Image: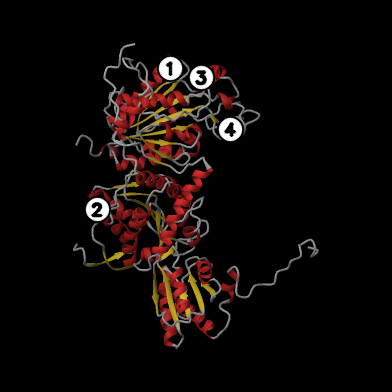
Amino acid sequence: MAENARVLMKGNEVLAEAAMRAGCRFFFGYPITPQTELAAYMAKKLPLIGGTFLQAESEIAAINMVYGAAAAGARVMTSSSSPGVSLKGEGVSYMAGADVPGVIVNVERGGPGLGGIQPSQSDYFQATRALGHGDFYMPVLAPSTVQEMADLIYLAFDLADQYRTPAMILADGMIGQMMEPVELPPERDASALPEKPWATTGTKMQREHNVVNSLYLSPEKLEDTNRERFARYAEIRETQQRQELMMCDDAEIVVVAFGAASRIARTAVRDARAKGIKAGLLRPITLWPYPTKAIDQVIENGAKQFLSVELNMGQMVEDVRLAANGRADVSFYGRTGGVLPTPEEVLEQIEKLAAGEAPNASARATVMGSVLPQPIDRKSSYERGE
Amino acid sequence: MAAPKTPITLPDYQQERIGSQIAEGEKIKSARPHALTDAIFNYCPGCTHGIVNRLVAECIDELGIEGKTVGIAPVGCSVMCYDFFNCDMIEAAHGRAPAVATGVKRVHPDNVVFAYQGDGDLASIGTAETVHAATRGEKITVIFINNAIYGMTGGQMAPTSLPNQVTQTSPYGRDVSKVGYPVRIAELLSTLDGVAYVERVTCDSRAHILQAKKAIKKAFQNQIDGVGYSLVEVVATCPTNWGMTPQDAFQWLRDNMLPYYPLGVYKDVTADGFANAAEAALERAKDCPIAQQGRGE
């Protein structure tokens, strides 16, 4: 296969192929729908290029194998889907605490619990806020096309190594299962990968022993490590925000959507423009760091209203609201459980906003700090005689 | 005692440490193993962790493998052992040491990788990782300290606590009718095809300590030779949480622990005449055609 030829491939397989081209030679995972093709592709291809595919006994074991391999200096990844990613939370927290790089793929499905197996974006909070215990973040990249599956996992390995942090690809069952033409990235020169002098590769009796560790019993020392890590996070926030802006130069209503939802929102925004509504699309590519500078920019350009469109009950909308910080109205529209909104549904919301009407009632009721809050009954149930 | 057979040569960063303590013309008769750092153990008096840490370090020294050894520290009383060993060390989450060791060993098959774990870590929260690393035949060495109690958290019932043993969370004694029976890890793992060597030892006497060292050394040698997964279970004391003096604790170990956890070799494929665990597994499955595919090729 010529390196620059465009080929038709499935999203999950592209994640695997591009990861190998990024220098990943180790994969540890556990079977789960809808990321299956990724692991199957790795199982087939990795042994042929001197790599290791290992099906672990559990998601917990898989992420801890990733931790060990990463501590030993390898480019390594695991992939799963929502319920499996929950189990990985412990290991990811340890990786963050020990400053160990590695890539975690979440091809999201509906939740909570066992949920369903259709596409969803209901792990936004988990990915950007709370995948494991403790004070940490990690870069979270959200592909919206099969091409971006390739480009972003390639980037994820570099960000992970550069900042010594776990990094996540937050995809969904739709992008994972669909086929599109893709131009695969070139094979990374293994000798040009970043050196890892901190890795536990054996002292060879030539240096002090390396320790990969997240335990600090001294409160001051632990605080120091957290402050050092957050200085790195500040740099990531400053330099690594990524997004796509479409028709945002003069947009008054900006639809914010990522991943699969952004594909639907894109059509709705174009349709709104055709109807003379000044709509635009802001598509976050990095979910952490959140593209706050882009939010600032579209507000400067004249955006009055944001509409966050998600495949969940309203999660990213909180980041939109935080970034807008009262400078514009923020509303939400979402479908969940694997139900995808149609472009017409989203267009209807844009039209309502353009007409000065309240957005979708069901959406409004689901979001904290809603546009029209319900009056609060301050009496206790006892006082009300219940 | 005879002088060391080979002169002790120290890397530069170690010269200062030991060199300064030796007077002109003085001979080293017994030195802190090179594979141990200067850090002072944080173990309680009468605890066997210190002995076993030292035995592991002596074996690393004698096998000359410090420079390529990577150790995995557990969660439990030996959580800080990443500070005690001079080889590269990784601190694992509770119970996950075998999975972390798997990751390291798969990346660097020529490294010697060991996990050092207690009973709560290895036989309770990490049972799945333990059983599966063993059954995969990971070429790692596991040192398992079984003292029948959770030490670091203050003396709770462990998976290996004995029937009727009083602990913080079995204050009326371990009631096997309600919480079941202790896990005999050496026996359990000896049934798995991936396992090359399992021995149970203890450290209550000089003879037993020497036997323990022999077992630990073999468990490392097996890894160097590619024989397969090796585990040494050390029946150990916890005077602090057993509420005993060190002397009484060793007596309690002899009276109660050893009858429940008999010492001995539970599996040793090389003693059985096989080159490694894989050969032994093939022989065991000799009547299963699919398992024999590729045999002798």
The amino acid type of the residue labelled 3 equals: Pro
State which mark lies toward you, 1 or 4: 4
Residue with the mark numbered 3 = B259
Residue with the mark numbered 2 = A192
State which mark lies toward you, 3 or 1: 1
Q: Residue A136 location, x and y as percent?
A: 48, 53
Tell me whether circle 2 and circle 1 mark residues in contact (CB < 8 Å). Answer: no
Identify the subunit bearing mark 1: B
Look at the numbered disc 3 and give the secondary structure of its residue.
helix
Classify residue B191 by image quadrant. top left
Tell me whether circle 4 and circle 2 mark residues in contact (CB < 8 Å). Answer: no
Q: Quadrant of the N terminus of chain B?
A: top left
Residue with the mark numbered 4 = B154
Residue most toward the bottom? A276
Q: Do labels 4 and 2 share a chain?
A: no
Residue under the point 45% across and 51% down: A228
Calculate the distance from the C-alpha at mark 2 to the C-alpha at mark 1.
Answer: 52 Å
Tell me whether circle 3 and circle 2 mark residues in contact (CB < 8 Å). Answer: no
